[in-house]
Every structure is written in C-alpha cells, then in structure tokens.
Image: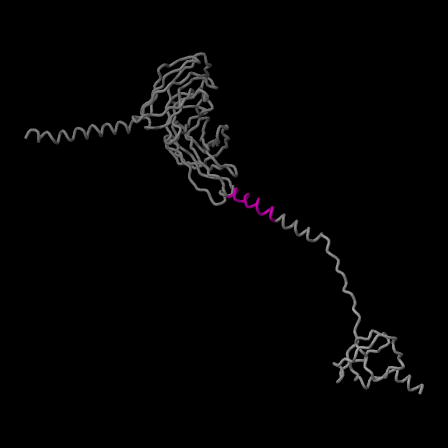
C-alpha cells in the first residue's frame, strides 16, 4: 500500500524536472567565454560558448571599435576576417574552439565576436584586449538607437521576366526597436549586396516613419539585383555604421536567356543561308535559248478521189518542161521541183487556174 501511495509522486518528479530543464534551455541565451582577456598578435585563445542552437555553424572573429553593449560598429569591416575561424555547436548548444590573435583593421576597444552563419541570426560578444594595438574612443551615440528584434526575411517572388534576365527584386522585411532615449525619425538604412568573395555594394534606403523610445516598428525595404544576376548572394542591413542583420539569397539562373541565344544561333545561320542562296540564284548566268529552225512549208495535199493514190515512180531523167505538163495533172508531194505551184486549199483541183494552161492556149 505504501508503494502504491508513492507511485504518483515518482511519476510527477521526472516530469517536473524535465519541464524545468526545457524551460531553462528555452530561456538560455547565447554566451561566450574566453580563456584569456588579453593576448598579443601571434598567440591564440580558447573560446567556449553555450546556449546556442544545436548543430549551428558559427564564425569567430576579433573585431575593433566594438563593445558588448553597442555591438560591432561598422560590421565585419571592423574585424580581422582573414584570421577568423568556424566552429559547429554540439547537441547541447555548446562549443569549444581555438582562435588566433590578430589585429583588426580599426582601433580597439575590441571584442571576440561570435555569430551564426546560416539559419536564425544570433550573436554574442566578449571583451578582449589585443596587446600593442591602438585604442580610440567610440563615436558618440545620437540619442536614438535601433536594433533588429526579429529575424530578417526576404519576401516576394520573381516574375516570368526574371526568367529572361530581368532584375530580381525582393522586399527585406524586419522589425526594429528603439533602445535609446530619443525618437528616431525617418531612419536611413544601408542595404549591402555581396556575391562570392567580392566586397558588398551599398545603397541607401530611407524608411518613412518614426520609432519612439522603447517602441518597435515593422520595416520593409526594396532590394534589387542587376539584370541577369544568378547565384548565391548575401544581403546585409546596416544602420548607424553597424550591421544589424544579414540574409542569404539564392537566385536561380535565367534559363530563358540561354534558350533565346540557342534559338538565335540556329535561326540566324538558317536565314543567312537562305538569303545567300537567293542571291546566288539571282546573279548566276542563265543558259541561252537556241531558236527553233524554220522548216520549209510543204504544199498542201489536194483532196479528191485520187488524193490518196500514188502514181508509179518516175524513172530518173531530165525534168519535164512546164509546157508539157497538163494543167489538170495534180502536183506530186514528192516532187522537189520549185516550179510546181501548190494548190490553195479552198480551190478544188479541177477548178484551180493554171498559168501553164493559159500560156498554152495563147500560143495555140
């Protein structure tokens, strides 16, 4: 009976401890600790972190002109990027890594800056002194101070024209809060576009509105790339000389341009070939036409009962005299003598006049 009474208590205790553990991990914030607070160039320090997202890729940098309160003023341009190191967090959100000591391109105060590379943005700073590096005062704050309260994102979609090389366009959406004591009116942000290993290209974007002290506002800024842009880009947001957020952007290749040039390489040679063949057909010499030989017109055959009958073939001899040929004798078609007269088709053989007959009658 005693065991049965204790059974509900035993079941509740693990549940409560698990809830406390989950709540503790949910409230944990990214933190960074250093093995040494000061070191000279050429050495190295051990950096430990806790409270990070499990399996996150982080970048460790030594940055100048920075404090944990104001962050990295000037963004990664104030850091020793060449000597930075990457590290991945474990399943518990912690990490340990070695970082070489290097002098940043700007004077101290310096920090060890740790930030996520991909996924949800998170960062933490730890004060560090680079021995022998110059120190300068930080620029004064202007009363109002904006900070990004939520992760930035790119909204929008590419149209059909982007597939043919039109400039890709998006809207950079984020929420800012005023951590200062004075309102910020019409703040001017800077949008940086980075492609590959090239330096970012910055453009100023003004947001029309006012953010009072302790207030927050949702900001949308247009982002546009060059025509035909494709590949992996990094969009950076800067305000007051400090990089507030970075957002990756993968742009697809404009395959419509490739298709257009492919069709152009096929159509243009075909058109040039057809034009060339038409020109050759016009200018090539034509063969001259030989006129048909004129044929001697044969005399028309007479019609009558004896038209189809042939007489006996004459033996070769002297040509008969035209006076000896009777007028009624029909002209032979085979007789090549030029003195024979062809009878007109509209006269009958017996009624056709004969010059020979007239001549004979006159002499008689």
Find the residue positioned furthest to the right: 363
Region rendered in magenta:
256-270
Between residue 255 and residue 168, name the one nearer to us. 255
Between residue 307 and residue 3, name the one nearer to us. 307
Give the position of the N terminus as an image quadrant. Answer: top left
Instruction: Identify which residue is drawn at 79% across, 67% down.
Output: 294
Q: By what rule are the colours in the image chosen?
A: one colour
Q: In the image, is residue 269 part of the stretch drawn in magenta?
A: yes
Q: In the rendering, at what x and y percent does residue 273 appear?
A: 63, 48
Between residue 333 and residue 235, name the one nearer to us. 333
Q: In the rendering, at what x and y percent does residue 32 appear?
A: 35, 21
Find the residue positioned furthest to the left: 1
User: Which of the 4 image quadrants contains residue 28?
Assistant: top left
Find the residue positioned furthest to the front: 315
User: Which of the 4 image quadrants contains residue 322?
Assistant: bottom right
Q: In the rendering, at what x and y percent does residue 314 appear?
A: 82, 77
Give the position of the C terminus as an image quadrant. Answer: bottom right
Most frequent secondary structure within the magenta stretch: helix
Tell how many labels: 0
């Amino acid at each position: 009976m005693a065991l049965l009474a204790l059974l509900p208590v035993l079941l509740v205790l693990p549940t409560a401890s698990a809830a406390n553990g989950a709540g503790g991990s949910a409230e944990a914030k990214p933190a960074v600790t250093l093995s040494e607070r000061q070191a000279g160039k050429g050495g190295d320090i051990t950096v430990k972190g806790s409270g990070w997202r499990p399996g996150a890729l982080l970048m460790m940098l030594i940055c100048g002109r920075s404090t944990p309160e104001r962050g990295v003023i000037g963004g990664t341009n104030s850091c020793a990027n060449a000597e930075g190191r990457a590290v991945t967090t474990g399943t518990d959100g912690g990490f340990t890594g070695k970082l070489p000591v290097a002098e940043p391109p700007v004077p101290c105060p310096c920090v060890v800056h740790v930030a996520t590379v991909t996924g949800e943005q998170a960062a933490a700073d730890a004060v560090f002194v680079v021995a022998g590096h110059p120190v300068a005062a930080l620029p004064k704050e202007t009363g109002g101070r904006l900070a990004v309260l939520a992760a930035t994102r790119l909204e929008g979609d590419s149209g059909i024209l982007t597939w043919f090389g039109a400039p890709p366009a998006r809207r950079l959406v984020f929420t800012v809060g005023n951590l200062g004591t004075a309102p910020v009116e019409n703040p001017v942000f800077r949008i940086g576009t980075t492609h590959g290993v090239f330096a970012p290209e910055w453009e100023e974007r003004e947001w029309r509105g006012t953010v009072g002290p302790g207030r927050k506002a949702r900001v949308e800024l247009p982002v546009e790339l060059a025509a035909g842009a494709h590949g992996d880009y990094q969009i950076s947001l800067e305000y007051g000389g400090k990089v507030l957020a970075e957002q990756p952007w993968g742009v697809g290749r404009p395959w419509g341009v490739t298709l257009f040039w492919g069709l152009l390489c096929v159509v243009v040679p075909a058109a040039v070939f057809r034009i060339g063949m038409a020109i050759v057909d016009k200018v090539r010499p034509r063969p001259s036409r030989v006129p048909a030989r004129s044929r001697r017109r044969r005399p028309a055959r007479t019609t009558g009962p004896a038209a189809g009958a042939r007489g006996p073939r004459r033996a070769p001899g002297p040509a008969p005299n035209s006076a000896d040929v009777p007028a009624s004798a029909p002209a032979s078609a085979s007789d090549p003598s030029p003195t024979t007269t062809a009878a007109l088709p509209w006269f009958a053989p017996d009624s056709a006049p004969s010059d020979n007959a007239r001549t004979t009658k006159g002499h008689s």
